[in-house]
Image (spheres, rainbow, N blue to C red):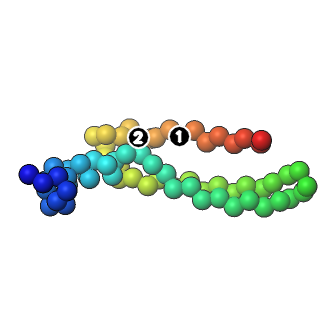
Amino acid sequence: MQLNNPRNPMIQELTRYCTYLPRVDVTYAVKPIAQTILKIDVTIKPSWKYNPKWHSKSEVFWVLFDDE
């Protein structure tokens, strides 16, 4: 059995399960408003396949900002 063959059923199943891992696509735009103030627009979109067997009704993510 070759593991690097994409037609291998085990590889196909593993690939399918990998699409269930929660991940997000993040885009942002930064605009200066004043010398010490920035406006930051952040768009966060889910990028995984929902499966009720593996996911709850909602997924929680932390969004952290730092002013260093």
Residue 44 is situated, as x and y percent measured from the top left of the image, at 56, 54
Q: Amino acid at mark 1?
A: Phe
Q: Going 69% across and 42% down the picture, which residue do you hit?
A: 65
Q: Quadrant of residue 54?
A: top left
Please report the residue visible at 38 percent of the width from the left and 38 percent of the height from the top: 56
Residue 26, percent from left and from top:
56, 55
In the rendered view of the protein, which quadrant contains the C terminus?
top right
Quadrant in the rendering for residue 40: bottom right
In the picture provided, is 26 more to the left or to the right than 9?
Answer: right
Q: Residues within 10 Å of mark 2 (few under 14, many from 20)?
A: few
The structure residue drawn at horizontal position 78% and vertical position 56%, both measured from the top left corner, is 39
Q: Which residue is mark 2?
A: 57
Q: CA distance from mark 1 to mark 2?
A: 14 Å
Residue 16: where, in percent of width, then height? 26, 52
Residue matched to label 1: 61
Query: Quick one: SS at disc 1?
Result: loop
Residue 35 % position (x, y): 91, 55
Q: In the figure, is residue 63 to the left or right of 45?
A: right
Left or right? Give the position of 62 relative to 38.
left
- Residues packed near mark 1 inside 10 Å, few (<14), some (14 to 19) or many (20 plus): few
